[in-house]
Amino acid sequence: MKYLMLVCVDPDFTPGADDGKPDVDDWVGEMDGKGIRLMGDRTRPASAATTVRVRNREVLVTDGPFVETKDLIAGFDVLECEDLDQAIEVATQHPMAWAGAIELRPVWPWGDE
Amino acid sequence: MNKEIAAVYADGWGRIVATMIRFTGDWSLAEECTQEAFATALRVWPETGTPDQPLAWLTTVARRTAVDRLRRATVERAKLQEVAMEPAPWTADSEIPDDRLELMFTCCHPALNVEAQVALTLRGVAGMSTAEIARAFLVPEKTMGQRIFRAKQRIKQAGIPFRVPPGHLLPERLTAVLHVLYLLFNEGYSGSGELCREAIRIGRTLVGLMPDEPEAQGLLALMLVQDARRTARTGADGTLLSLDEQDRARWDRALIEEGAALCERALRRGKAGPFQLQAAIAVCHATAASVEETDWPQIAGLYEHLRRVTPGPVVDLNRAVAVAMASGPEAGLALVDAIDGLDGYHLLHATRADLLRRAGRNDEAAGSWRRALDLAPTEAERRLLTDRLAAAPAGSAVSGGPAASPRTAPPGAPPSAPRPGG
């Protein structure tokens, strides 16, 4: 199963002392090596986002994110996993699960119910 | 339902559903086909007699129904091919794989909310109908139907696996399964008891399937001993009775003995977890002739052990009560006053009032009673407190424990919070 892994910032999180948080490069190396991480990257903050809408055949381009919330999404990865348990384990090993949150969204392929 | 079929249903439902889920990968289809198989049995068996291998018979019928349904649904062609390629149907009960553990772990997966876990377990493992589950939780049948439907959909869409978790995840996941069972049990404890019976039945299955897990045994022992006292907990008028008010002759000795033996066997493994310790405490209460003759030092020691494995203020409160019974009210008061974070809990103040009164500090006791009454969440709880105060002779214990029922734990207390009371 494919999962879109949204790497999120938790604005309420205050880092403690050295908590043994894993290193992101190690994570990328390991998951790429296992063929679990298909792609992924950081994303620039919401201030660099552009929102595009077409209304009445007119293109409306606005600066900023579509949802005006705090800047939550910091990056993304696409995972290929056996099942949710494996995806949870992979997410657990990502440093942002320790300092923010990871949201796992199953990819919904065309043709599936 | 025909008696023989009912007996097969009790043990066979979960097994056939689990096999059919493995077989079709579709929870709703698996349940529908199993239901269909039992409906066929109800029609056929009275005429032909119960087959020698009833599970194999039922599973074969369920499988045939599944293949028929998939054949009619053209969108599932690929699935049908997969199913049709499976080996021939089972001819003997012993050939049917027992996938009930997989079923339990999937029903109690942490990616499902607790309500969904509970509903799925009752439907899938215990074979209760949606209407029965809805009644047990006092929600409309439609609501429960939707809850179960969404949970099944979520299992499929989120990719929740149908399997027993690997070793490194097992302790955590088993804890989740045990908590769901205990939640079910507690839900039934104050009601008709149907859910208690189901929880115990599933608990027995779990212990049978995981004989090396002492916590599973501990939970089953705890439920058996609590259930033994269930009917003695309420008076003729339906009010809750505390331990010292209960007629101990009404306790079910056979259940208590079974629970005590199971608890002892589990503890002998030397891995005492919260359920085993709570069971041991419940056994101490259940095997005592009266509140006075209860082995309070032993209970205080067990609470001391329990607070090391699951620290929490409710455990501390129960420990304080046991210590007061063993070593006098002042010793208990010192522990009650050291408890942090339960100031809004009426039973803390009720316990405090009781201990103060026993220590002869009546003025202070009155203040604590008022506080307890102010904080009591329901009229029934308030009445219980007032009755106890009125009934208590000066200098005696008001109750055998602060928690009169499993439901009285404060919000947020873990399901494993101790319940030594009635």
Image (cartoon, coloured by chain):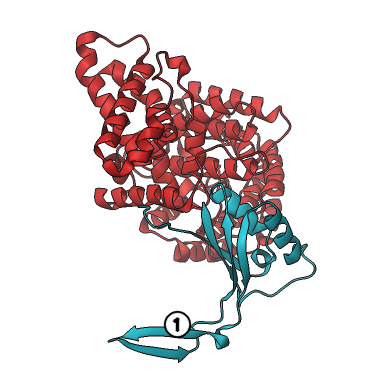
Q: Is residue B203 above or below residue B47?
A: below
Residue B405 visible to the viewer: no
* Chain ID, mark 1: A
Query: Which chain corresponds to the colour red?
Result: B
For this rendering, which residue is in front, B407 or A92?
Answer: A92
- Residue B203 point in image, percent of width and height: 50, 32
Find disc 1 in the rendering and name its residue.
A66
Q: In the rendered view, does B201 fall on the left or right side of B76? A: right
Residue occupying image coordinates x 52% and y 40%: B105
State the SS at label 1: loop
Where residue A96 sits, quadrant-wise, is bottom right
- Residue A111 point in image, percent of width and height: 36, 54
- Residue B242 point in image, percent of width and height: 47, 42
Where residue B286 sits, quadrant-wise, is top right
- The amino acid sitting under disc 1 is Phe
Task: Locate the N terminus of chain B by quadrant.
Answer: top left
Q: In the rendered view, does B258 fall on the left or right side of B148? A: right
For this rendering, which residue is in front, B266 or A35?
Answer: A35
Specify few, some or many for label 1: CA neighbours under 10 Å numbering under 14, 14-19, or 20 or more: few
Q: Is residue A69 above or below residue B37?
A: below
For this rendering, which residue is in front, B237 or B366?
Answer: B237
Residue sticking out furthest to the right: A18
- Residue B418 point in image, percent of width and height: 58, 45
Where residue B58 sits, quadrant-wise, is top left
Residue B59 visible to the viewer: yes
- Count the marks: how many? 1
Q: Is residue B414 above or below residue A24?
A: above
Query: Which chain corresponds to the colour cyan?
Result: A
